[in-house]
Amino acid sequence: MTEEYPSVRMSGAQGAPRPSAFPRARLTSPAVLSGAHTDHAFDLARCLLAREFPQRWEHSQGAAAGASRLAPILGKHSEVVRAAALLHDIGYASTVSRTGFHPLDGARYLRGLGVDQRVVSLVAHHTFALLEAELRELREPLEGEFELPPQELQDAMVYCDMTSALNGQLTTSRVRTAEILIRYGTESIVGRFITRAEPLIHAAVARVVDRLDRAGESV
């Protein structure tokens, strides 16, 4: 199914872009893992989030900073994870949201742009998105349309997302999950998801920290 998005006039970082506003070559080639790869992800995420959701934009920049901290253990995957960290919340943008479930909407939007499949899959499945998809009765399309990334990259995305506070500052996964539960409420879909996923989130972050420790890196 082809996703259709409204035509929106671009005005620097102020406007929300439609897919055709961005050249495909910058994020499509698996060989494009240089600074240009994440520079373009930065521009796209900024255009979609900075004005409408400034806190989510700050959070996304913090998540990207987390990916940079993981570079010593991510190796050749570092830029892919950093691009996904920058883009993981674009599904909240009004020009992108279709189902109300941001991992699915963001991934479909990026797929429509022809973005590198590895980045798209990380956005689709970030932070145990399948568990929330079940609560929203959207597991089938998410699981059917987007392949699960390797476990180590899934863990890296959990670390990036769940150690970046809403203001982009470094935090702990326990503080972050507690803040989400307060913000959404325990009976909301998001609250129920976090309650279910919380042990998995902390375990994933712990695995990443352990890998960093074994590599002689500190966070």
Image (cartoon, rainbow, N blue to C red):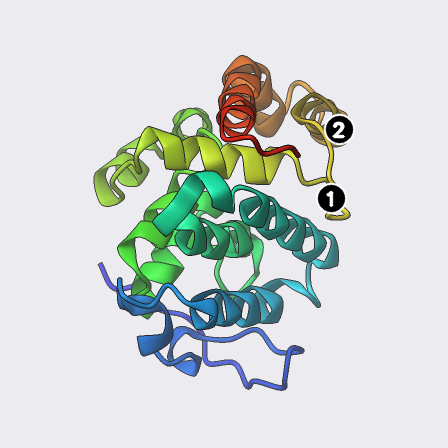
Q: Residue at x 73, y 59 (%)?
A: 54
Q: Is residue 41 above or below residue 11?
A: above
Q: Position of residue 40 (x, y in %)?
A: 48, 72
Q: Dot 2: within a 10 Å radius of its alpha carbon, few (fewer than 14), some, or many (20 or more) residues?
A: some
First in sequence: mark 2 or mark 1?
1
For badge 2, the amino acid type reads: Glu
Q: Label 1: which residue?
A: 166
Q: Viewed as shown, does residue 54 lie left or right of 47?
A: right
As drawn, which residue projects farthest toward the front?
Answer: 216
Residue 129 visible to an observer of this rendering? no
Up the image or down, 160 lies above or below 49; here it is above
Can you give x and y, in whole percent of width and height, for residue 184 in the image?
70, 30
Seen in the picture, residue 33 relative to 183 is either above or below; the reply is: below
In-front residue for pair 152/96: 152
**Residue beneath the point at 53% across and 41% down:** 70
Element class at badge 2: helix
Report x, y in % for residue 2. Answer: 25, 64
Q: Quadrant of the C terminus?
A: top right
- The residue carrying mark 2 is 179
